[in-house]
Image (cartoon, rainbow, N blue to C red):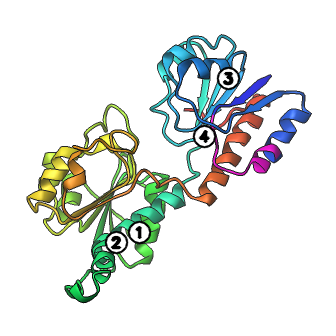
Amino acid sequence: MKIVVLENLKVPQERIEEMAKPLVEAGHEFKYYPEKTTDSDEMVKRCQGADIITLANNPLPEEVLDQLDQLKYINVAFTGVDHIPLIKAKDRDILVSNAAGYANTAVAELVIGMTLNLLRQLRASDQEVRLTEDFPGIRQGSEIKGKTVGIIGTGKIGKETAKLFKAFGANLMGFNRSRDQELIDMGMDYSSLEELLAQSDIITIHLPLNRETQQFFGENQLKAMKESAILINCARGPIVDAKALAEALAEGEIAGAGIDVFDSEAPLREDHPLLSAPNTLLSPHIGYFTHEAMDIRAQIAFENIYQYLKDQPQNLV
C-alpha cells in the first residue's frame, strides 16, 4: 500500500524513520512531507495513488478528497476531526480515525497555567516590575485552593484537568451527558449547567466542536456566572461566543478569561473582540503543543496505521 504523511508531525525526522521502518520493511511505500501545504493541487499531487493518508490539523478540502480514488483510510493525528469531510468519507466507505488522548496532560496543564496566571495576575506583574522606578506596587491575587471549579465536559481531557485542580485543593463540579464514577469518587458534584455556572469560581470548557456545541457558551451563560469568576477555554474556539465574552469582560460581568482557541488560527484579525478585552490571557492554540504530546501523537498515529493494516482498525470516529 501507499502510505502518505501529509504534514509535519512535529517530532524529529529520525523518530519518523524509526516508526516507519516496519512499514517499509513490510513492502509498503511510505512518503513523509515535513512541510505543510494548504494548496489543494499540491495536496492532490502528494496524495495521488495513496491508500492511507495521515494529517494533523491541516484541513482536508472536499475537492481534494474527490480526486483521491484509491484512498481507503484517513488517519488524523489530532483529537478533533471537524476539519475532515466526514460525511463524504463515509459515503465512500473511507475509514477515519483520530489520535484522541495524546494531549490530555498538555491541555490540562495549560488550563492550570492560565488559571494561575489570571488569579495571581502574573502577566501584569511581570510588565509592572519592569517599570523600575515607576513600579506601581504589588498586586494581590487569589488561590485555587478552596475554589469551586466547574468542568464542562468530563471526557479524557476534562478528567485530567479535574485531577490537577483536585491536587490544588479545589472543589469540583461537573456538567456532562454521562457521569464518571472515578470523578464522583474524587468528590466531583455533577449538576445542571445552571447550577455549575452559578456556583463556580473557575469554569473550564472541555467539549468537542459539533452542531450542538457551536456557540454553546454565550451571553446567557456569561450572565449566569459570578462576577468574580474566570472562564478558561482550551477546547475549540467556536464553542464560545467571542463577542459576548469580550462584552462581559468589558462590563465586569466576569473577572477574567484565558483563551487558547478562536474561530480561526492565529494571527487573529485586527478587530477581533478579545484583543481589546480587559483581564484576558490569550495564547495561539498551544494547548496540545508540547514535546511530550507530539511524540505520543506520532506513536498513536503510527499504531493506527499498523492496526489498520492488520484489519483491526482502532480509534475510529
Residue type at mark 2: give it: Asn
| Residue 95 seen anywhere in this rendered image of the structure | yes
Q: Which quadrant is home to the C terminus?
A: top right
Q: CA distance from mark 1 to mark 4?
A: 25 Å
Label 1, secondary structure: give it. Answer: helix
Label 4, secondary structure: give it. Answer: loop
Q: Nearer the viewer, residue 121 or 137?
A: 137
- Quadrant in which residue 17 is drawn: top right
Asked if residue 14 is among those painted magenta in the image, a careful observer would answer yes
Q: Earlier in the sequence, mark 1 or mark 4?
A: 4
The residue wearing badge 4 is: 77
Density class for disc 4 (Cα within 10 Å; few <14, some 14-19, many ≥20) is: many
Say which of marks 2 and 4 sits in front: 2
Residue 122's spot in the image, x, y percent? 33, 76
- Quadrant in which residue 99 is drawn: top right
**Residue at image coords 71%, 28%:** 4
The residue wearing badge 2 is: 117
Residue type at mark 3: give it: Arg
Residue 255's spot in the image, x, y percent? 18, 66
Residue type at mark 4: give it: Ala
Contact between labelled residues 1 and 2, with CB atoms less than 8 Å apart: yes
Say which of marks 3 and 4 sits in front: 3
